[in-house]
Image (tube, rainbow, N blue to C red):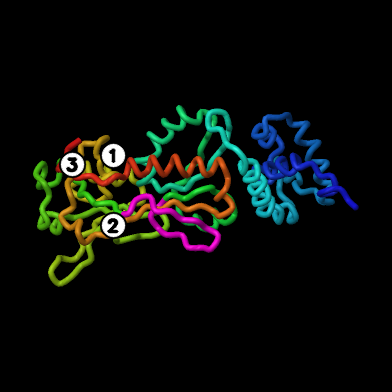
């Protein structure tokens, strides 16, 4: 009977993963916190193990062989699964060093992350985060283990995923600046309908949800521009007569850092109420560290997104 994995040291697979990602012995050594000769010796052992060069010199750089390319994805998935094993037992947030990978779109991250990270510094000083804003590959990233959790509005449907609603509804507010004709008065329904607008859209696609649907009783939409960057969206409203709409909690944070006014959306009753969902892979369900993260993030999000009555405000 052969030894498990024919005696292959799993640490070599960690080194191989970094080598295939960085395509450089020098950079791999820096990432792994070791020396260049150590990584070179590991690569030599890996070449014998797989009977393939894996990486070859190409000018001043290194190129990955076809076999090396075929190993990249399954190696990432295998190491991700092994990482999950480490956290299945106990988790002590005051001492354990755990790195979590999250997908949280910008409009939620701007509200949640500053105070959540500050809270982590007190409760879990060794825990670190990587937060990605794009939801384009959220489903595949969860299934492959590339991310640990997604906090967003769109539903991700798959039998291998668990989902929990954090917030049932998010009311909408209008955001406008000092160059808008109605400044500093509250915005009426007629003013909103007659104003040209700038729409904040996901990087992946254009969504028209922030404006009410047209009908015989309402004018056609007056969307002047669509942008995917929240900072650009806010700066444009501050410097032009364009208006926009955001969920109230996000609008308040954005307006606080600029000379902007927010007011209840005059058509809030017919705009979509966005539920915020937390989604994770079933393999993480009993993971002690992941359970801790879900609990803390849920409490924090529920507090930050709690229902609120908005009166017209200025920054």
Residue at x 15%, y 72% (from the top left corner): 216
Task: Mark 3 vs mark 1: give the one in front.
Answer: 1
> In the drawing, what numbered circle is on residue 161?
none
Rounded to the nearest angstrom, the CA distance separating label 2 from label 1 is 19 Å
Q: Secondary structure at mark 3?
A: strand
Rounded to the nearest angstrom, the CA distance separating label 2 from label 3 is 22 Å
Question: Mark 1 or mark 3, which is nearer the start of the sequence?
Answer: 1
Compare residues 111 and 132 and report the one nearer the observer.
Answer: 111
For mark 1, what is the residue?
Answer: 253
Q: Does 193 appear in magenta?
A: no
Compare residues 308 and 234 and report the one nearer the observer.
Answer: 308
Residue at x 42%, y 31% (from the top left corner): 119
Question: Mark 3 or mark 2, which is nearer the start of the sequence?
Answer: 3
Task: Give the left or right position of residue 298, taking residue 191 as reference.
Answer: right
Residue 197, position as x, y percentages in the image:
22, 54
Task: Give the left or right position of residue 135, taking residue 230 as reference.
Answer: right
For mark 3, what is the residue?
Answer: 261
* Pointer 2 local density, CA inside 10 Å: few below 14, some 14–19, many at least 20: some
Quadrant hosting residue 45: top right
Q: Does 159 appear in magenta?
A: yes
Residue at x 34%, y 55% (from the top left corner): 275
Stretch in magenta: 152-168
Is the residue 314 above or below the residue 122 in the image? below
Residue 281, position as x, y percentages in the image:
54, 54
For mark 2, what is the residue?
Answer: 273
Residue 151, position as x, y percentages in the image:
43, 49
CB contact under 8 Å: marks 3 and 1: no
Task: Mark 2 vs mark 1: give the one in front.
Answer: 2
Q: Return the residue found at the far bottom.
A: 216
């Amino acid at each position: 009977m052969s030894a498990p994995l024919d005696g292959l040291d799993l640490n070599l697979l960690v080194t191989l993963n970094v080598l295939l990602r960085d395509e450089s012995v020098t950079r791999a050594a820096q990432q792994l916190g070791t020396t260049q000769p150590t990584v070179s010796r590991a690569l030599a052992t890996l070449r014998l193990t797989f009977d393939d060069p894996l990486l070859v010199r190409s000018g001043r750089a290194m190129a990955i062989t076809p076999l090396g390319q075929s190993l990249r994805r399954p190696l990432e998935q295998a190491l991700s699964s092994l990482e999950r094993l480490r956290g299945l037992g106990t988790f002590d947030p005051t001492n354990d060093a755990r790195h979590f990978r999250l997908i949280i779109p910008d409009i939620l991250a701007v509200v949640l992350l500053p105070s959540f990270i500050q809270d982590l510094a007190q409760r879990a000083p060794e825990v670190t985060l990587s937060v990605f804003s794009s939801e384009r590959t959220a489903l595949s990233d969860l299934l492959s283990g590339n991310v640990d959790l997604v906090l967003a509005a769109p539903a991700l449907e798959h039998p291998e995923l668990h989902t929990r609603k954090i917030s049932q509804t998010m009311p909408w507010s209008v955001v406008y600046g000092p160059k808008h004709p109605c400044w500093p008065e509250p915005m009426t329904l007629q003013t909103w309908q007659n104003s040209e607008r700038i729409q904040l859209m996901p990087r992946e696609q254009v969504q028209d949800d922030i404006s009410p649907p047209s009908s015989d009783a309402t004018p056609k939409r007056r969307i002047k521009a669509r942008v995917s960057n929240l900072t650009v969206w806010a700066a444009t409203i501050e410097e032009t007569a364009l208006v926009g709409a955001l969920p109230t909690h996000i609008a308040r944070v954005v307006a606080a850092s600029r000379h902007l006014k927010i007011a209840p959306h005059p058509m809030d009753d017919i705009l979509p109420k966005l539920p915020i969902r937390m989604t994770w892979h079933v393999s993480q369900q009993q993971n002690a560290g992941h359970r801790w993260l879900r609990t803390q993030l849920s409490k924090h999000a529920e507090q930050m997104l709690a229902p609120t009555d908005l009166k017209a405000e200025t920054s």
